[in-house]
Image: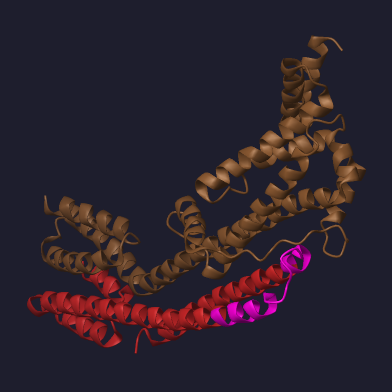
Amino acid sequence: MSDEIKNLIQESFLRDEAKRELLRLLELGDWQNFWPAFNQSLIEELQKRQNRTNEVIEKYEKELKKMENDFVKESEKLQNYFNEQSLNVSTVDLKTKEEIWEKYYSAREELQKSFKQKMSQTLQTILLTEDARMFD
Amino acid sequence: MSKVFESIQQGIEKMIGRKERVDFRNRVKDFATRNGVNLNLAEKQIFKKYLDGYSLLYRRDGFVDSGNKFWSDLKGGFDETVYPDLQERIKQAADFGSGHLRNIPPQLILPRELTQIERYFSQKYNGQKPENLVCQEVAAEMKALQYVLNRFSVDLNGHLHNSASLADFLATNQAAAADLGLIFKLNELIKKHEKHFSNKLAFEKEKENLKNIGKEAITQMFWQMPIDWLTSAVKNSWKMMQRRELAPFGSFVKDALSSLGKSAKLFGKTFSSSIKLLLVYFQTLKK
């Protein structure tokens, strides 16, 4: 049984420090202290992960909120520019109207595309940074 | 032409997407027979009825869906009676600078009219409506369309009872022909606004999906390893239980599962199946 438990500890998601202490207790055959220490380490690590998950999701949401605010501002700028462009177009000049609207929609779709790219980049950055910090 | 042959021919036409043309032709014939008038006069009457139908809808709802059956009926009547060369001339007459366009007075949009447009989008798209800029434009185009359609109807009224065909009427009245071209063009524009609005909604939906995918990826990054490990630990417990070595091992599994279960509840569905699996194992272990 000891070997199986040793393997479990070594393969676990616990921090190195905790693993070392558990392996020491296991070597000593100190079962009385081993199981409470194992439980405690496990629960502490899960709690840490829960806290980190909440923090990182909060950070991700903050980044998205900021990006969405920028997106709204850019959209408003685009609308204002479009309003100026369409002011002097005759009501029967549908061709010019159509061209202006196509430009507007095309610019808006570019904004959307860029937003999606930024979203994806933000997520990648967060995942890479946090993955590297996982065992800090 | 025998009735059987005509019926087969109409069936084929419907199959190749000309149902509205067949319907128009049948309505014209039916009108001519019932009223004892010639086909030229009947086709103008039916075309006029289509236009009146649009006006009725517009007066009732303040908006006519750009995909409404009216449009396919009107296009069917148009294609059935107006030969391709004249269709092209009508399209050109509707171009700005063609010299045939009559003015459309600037359309002042009343708050009630704007509300009707917003309500249309809201009802059709689950409470969503385009930005004010687009609603204003659609309202203006819709109003311009109604204005031009009325003007065209009045022109057509003046020629309803002469023997000229609808095509003759359009060929000799270029201002009216330009109006008909404008009617189709305005509907195309309205349809495009709706299509772009629909694209915008698709973007919003995709944005929400991406947000959730991001949260799931973050959750997975922190929780996949503990879940994999615990699954493996519980499996090992099962083996040890079979070898009667379970007693000291069971308590940490219980605590770990309890802790993990509480934590995982925060993260929705992603890990629920893994947690359920673990709990089932644990229940089995306790027995």
**Quarter-wise, where is residue B168 in the image?**
top right
B211 w.r.t. B281: above or below: below
Extreme residue toward the left, this view: A32
- Note whether residue B82 is visible: no
Image x and y of residue A113, in percent? 60, 72
Q: The magenta stretch spans which residues? A: A76-98
Q: Looking at the picture, tell me which residue is in the foreground, B260 or A19.
A: B260
Q: Could you tell me how many numbered marks the image carries?
A: 0
Q: A24 or B152, which is in the foreground? A: B152
For image coordinates 48% across by 62% down, the residue present is B205
Q: Which chain is brown?
A: B
In the image, is A100 to the left or to the right of A53?
A: right
Residue B274, percent from left and from top: 31, 58
Q: Residue at x 21, y 71 (%)?
A: A2
Chain drawn in red: A
Residue shown at the point (62%, 60%) measured from the top left: B193
Q: Is residue B272 left or right of residue B104?
A: left
The residue positioned 15% from the left and 78% from the top of the image is A40
Magenta stretch containing residue A105, yes or no? no
In x, y percent, where is residue B5? 82, 13
**Could you tell me what secondary structure mostly forms the magenta stretch?**
helix
Give whichever of A115, B91 is nearer the camera.
Answer: B91
Q: In which quadrant will I find the N terminus of chain A?
A: bottom left
Whether residue A92 appears in magenta in the rendering, the answer is yes
**Screen quadrant of the C terminus of chain A:** bottom left
Within the image, what quadrant is residue B84 found in? Answer: top right
Is there any visible trace of residue B92 in the rendered image?
A: yes
